[in-house]
Amino acid sequence: MTDDLVNVGVAEYYVTHNSHVLACFGLGSCVGVALYDGRKKIGGLAHIMLPNSKAITKRGNPGKYADTAIQNMVEKMEKLGAKRRDMRAKAVGGACMFSIPGAINPRNVPGPALGMQIGDRNVEAVKVVLKELGIPLMAEDTGGGHGRTMRFDISNGTVTVNSIKHGVMEL
């Protein structure tokens, strides 16, 4: 991997055709989505915080939501010469980081309360948006109860995931 590391913070996205490594540090319930056109070596990474902008009246930053972050990344990649038909996606994160003692989840067992499974909702929203845009999700490391850091190497499309619980893996 190259030494040009770009930190993509919470509710941000970054698109480039340069051989940078894009990184999302400390993904908990947030989802990191890497989009890559391997033919043109153009990629982008979003650090998505919430599933859908349509439920919010004051939307603000488009990088915060799965629907707007992914759509904006696709548009910026196309402006750099990428083709949607050549784009592939990888997703990391979407963990359930917190539980509320005594709360009841939808399956009527102790655990996170209804509406609190933001990690699961983020992962599902990412999958819906990718399907709507016709971009295949090639690999994912999502869910569970542990945080992750992801690094996306634009020079070759490799995504590396680090977690204390599971070590290092490549998607």
Image (spheres, helix red, strand yellow):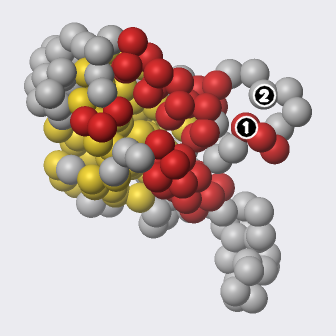
Residue at 68% x, 77% y is 111
* Residue kind at label 2, given as amino acid type: Arg
| Residue 10 in view of the camera | no
| Residue 84 in view of the camera | yes
- The answer to whether residue 81 is above or below residue 141 is above
Label 2 or label 1, whichever comes before in sequence order: 1
Residue at 77% x, 70% y is 114
Residue at 35% x, 33% y is 84
C-alpha separation, residue under disc 2 versus residue under disc 1: 6 Å
Q: Residue 32: x percent and y percent?
A: 43, 40
Q: Assess disc 1: are there few (<14), some (14-19) or many (≥20) residues with their C-alpha within 10 Å of its C-alpha.
A: some
Q: Residue 100: x percent and y percent?
A: 74, 68
- The answer to whether residue 74 is above or below residue 94 is above
* Residue kind at label 1, given as amino acid type: Ser
The residue identified by callout 1 is: 53
The residue identified by callout 2 is: 59
- The answer to whether residue 107 is above or below residue 144 is below
